[in-house]
Amino acid sequence: MPEKVNLNALGREAAYQLADVTKTPPQFAAVTPRWLTRALEFKGLAAGIYRVNKVAEGDTPLDVLCGQDPRKIEIPQGYVEYETKPREYHLNSVSTILNVDTKVSDVYSAPYDQIGEQIALAIESLKERQESQLINNDGYGLLKNAADSQRIRPRNEAPTPDDLDELITKVWKEPSFFLAHPRAVAAFERECTRRGVPPITANLYGGNFIVWRGIPIIPTDKLFVDGLKNPKSQAGKTNILLVRTGEAKRGVIGLYQTGLPGEQSRGLSVRFRGIDDNGVASYLLSLYCSAAILADDALAVLEDVEVGEYYDYR
């Protein structure tokens, strides 16, 4: 073995004491891109209530005369009836209280401000919960509130091109995007590869997405697989949504409160609650949100698709 050399020089451990360490801000692994809140059209509310008025219509809301028949010159008469009990959507709040020891924030706030970093991480948590609620909330979530007539099941188990085409027949009036768990997106890509029809990709909302029939497939881990964001098993069941968004298109829209005290971003406020006798500063963070489905055909669900089908191409 080579003889150990004794260097007559300053060692690493001692030199480290004088070195500046380059630091990152806190890294929060649970943060996702939240593409749904970017792709969904939002409408601000002044009083936290949104009423969806609908016409009680048949095939056509009002009889009309088309062309001129000399034997019949009477123009049809009538009016368009409205629903007398339209649905109202009320904003829900996603809230948390953040506590920061002022002694810590006073002394340890360089190079990063401790209060600012704590609030930023709390805001990320609220926005993650917002996206989950937009999909899964019992009262207004897209998954629970899709009409029964807009729900279909896969032809086999895995999500195939035929299944997504069937979804398009349910939301054929200007569909905006598919929404699926990343495992479901991968399962669909495998089915496309197996059939020799790989989907193209496109850059939208600041990210790259695969596209089927010109409609982007947006990934989100808030559409759970067997009730989990990150399932351990390769197999599992999930759902795929197809959404038309926009108030002008009678689609799905997100809702938020405008003019909040301490407003930080859309529907989100941060308010200082004071400092207690122990020097702990308290902040209330609230995010007000909901979603409305303006027409039944604005949303369709492909239910119980299997994400664990794999193939051997050798």
Image: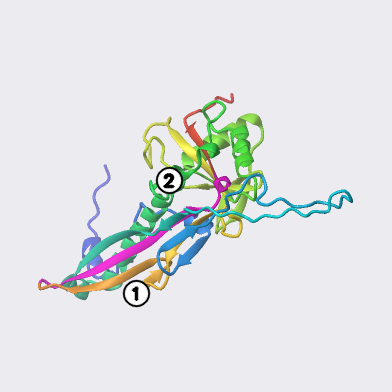
Magenta range is 278-299
Looking at the picture, does residue 212 appear above or below residue 80?
A: above
Give the label on residue 33, or none.
none
Residue sticking out furthest to the right: 70
In the rendered image, residue 198 lying in the magenta stretch gets the answer no
Name the amino acid type tagged 1. Answer: Pro
**Looking at the picture, how far across and down is residue 169, in whole percent?**
64, 39
Query: Foreground residue, 97 or 200?
Result: 97
Q: Earlier in the sequence, mark 2 or mark 1?
A: 2
**Residue, disc 2:** 221
Q: Are marks 2 and 1 in contact (CB under 8 Å)?
A: no
Q: CA–CA distance between discs 2 and 1?
A: 31 Å
Query: Foreground residue, 232 or 180?
Result: 180
Q: Quadrant of the C terminus?
A: top right
Task: Give SS at disc 2.
Answer: loop
Is 178 on the left-hand or right-hand side of 281?
Answer: right
Q: Quadrant of the N terminus?
A: top left
Residue at coordinates 20% horizontally, 75% vertically from top-left? 106
Give the label on residue 261, or none.
1
Q: Quadrant of residue 99?
A: bottom left
**Looking at the picture, how far across and down is residue 77, in whole percent?**
71, 55
Q: Quadrant of residue 118?
A: bottom left
